[in-house]
Image (cartoon, helix red, strand yellow):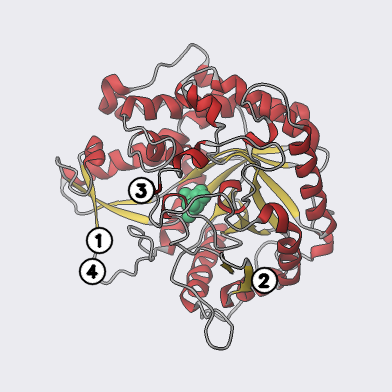
Amino acid sequence: MNDTQILRFPERFVWGAATASTQVDGAVAQGGKSESIWDRFATDASRIADGTNPAVTCDHYHRHRDDFDLMRSLGVPAYRFSIAWPRVVPSGDGAVNPTGLDYYDRFVDALLERGIRPFATLFHWDLPQTLQDRGGWARRETIDAYLRYTEATVRRLGDRVKDWMTHNEPWVFSFCGHLYGVHAPGSKDLATALSVAHHLLVAHGKAVPLIREACPGARVGLVNNLEWIEPASERVEDQAAATRWDGAFNRWFLDPIFGRGYPGDMLAWYGKAAPHVEPGDFDVMAAPTDFLGVNYYTRRIIAHDPAGRDASERTFLSARQMYWPFVPRAEFDEWEVAPEGLYRTLLRVQRDYQPASLYVTENGTTGLDRPGADGAVHDLYRTRYLARHTAAVHQAIADGADVRGYFVWSLVDNYEWAFGFSKRFGVIHVDHATQRRTVKDSGHWYGRTARANGFPLADANATL
Ligand code: FCB
């Protein structure tokens, strides 16, 4: 196969693009929205690579209609976006903000008017700061606050939005935000990270039946970041280190939602830091779902290392990542470009967990894109990345993984959390000073691929 060939996917395969509220919306203090933990975290400029904050980002709050027009003109018929909890319930657990829900009402209508199918994520890390002030997700009561927010949102939008994701990447939120301290809220404690993760998974399990009740015909799932892990060598120590890494990143977040509780090897490894589990929690977490969302970016080669080498926070696994010379890496520090890892991950999840179905809910890459003299953005490296990864999905489907769709991360260059605007993941370039959008070559390629796959825009919702 070469990169210009277009592979045929199953007829109803969903082609989409993804974003998240903090990363694109801006308008952080408009329409009754309260401060989120990311708004607060970024007030300390030293925590963000370029010292920026999410106050404006892509101004998607005001410009989403234009962005949807662009999607339509490209031919991308599905959009995964996240709803901002602080916009819907500004106090965290009190009254619903009617302006916030009205906004999402119009937002969803604007998608449907253009024949674009909405996929909504309920929690993509923007906890209301007021709840963080009371302990955030480390506190069990936050589960109830999340459920109230979820119910209000789904009741209002559920007549039109049928695809719901409870959380985005519980691993990243709990570990980057509560062990490594590089994401909001910035704590550094393993037991806190594990208790946050536990509460997220219980909240997920409780939300599933609630969403079904509030939205007849709902399809509900959780989005996990999964990585393909390989031991650095045949040495027993390296194999054990890779198994631990897989346990911490993948199995800890898959086993319980598929009814197996926490993996025993990791419970033993975590020892006293393991979370408090209340009776019934594992049954709750195992609520049957309609799909698993897989965010895939990289594979990791793991070696045993009692010192953890690269960062002291990682010594919790006595392991480190290593890199082979000349394996291409994304401009994103640690990420090897490894489409075969996506293929293997999808087949592994299909075989080991048998989810009702799978979506690739995020996949993409970053580079130093900017318009050239001809005004275009020639990001051939991204087109190649997307071609190779969508081909991996195609092969995974052929070999038995029930993958129903693929969402490129991201629709637009956006606010990459602690990297600020220093990373560009979009298939559409954004000049953040002028808000000018330029479709990158990869965006044109992606649209062509979607259009060539028999998913006509006008029918996007008729096929639900
Ligand atoms: C994932 C996040 C997403 C984006 C990509 C690059 O971990 O879900 O918001 O930042 O990474």
Q: Which mark is residue 323?
A: 1
User: Considering only order in the chain, which callout, 2 or 3, is on the residue closer to the N terminus?
Assistant: 3
User: Considering only order in the chain, which callout, 1 or 3, is on the residue closer to the N terminus?
Assistant: 3
Is residue 352 found left or right of 13 in the rendered image? Answer: left
Label 2 SS:
helix
Label 3 SS:
helix
Q: Looking at the picture, which amino acid does disc 1 mark?
A: Tyr
| Residue holding disc 3 | 46
Q: Which mark is residue 447?
A: 2
Q: Which mark lies nearer to you, 3 or 2?
A: 3
Q: Residue furthest bottom?
A: 374
Return the x and y of residue 385 as percentages of the image width and height: 48, 69
Q: CA distance from mark 4 to mark 1?
A: 6 Å
Up-down relation of residue 25 to residue 92 (above or below): below
Is disc 2 in contact with disc 4, using a CB cutoff of under 8 Å? Answer: no
Q: Is residue 167 visible?
A: yes
Is disc 4 in contact with disc 1, using a CB cutoff of under 8 Å? Answer: yes
User: Considering only order in the chain, which callout, 4 or 2, is on the residue closer to the N terminus?
Assistant: 4
Ligand 1 within 8 angstroms of badge 1 C-beta: no
Label 4 SS:
loop
| Residue holding disc 4 | 325
| Dot 4 crowding, Cα within 10 Å, few <14, some 14–19, many 20+ | few
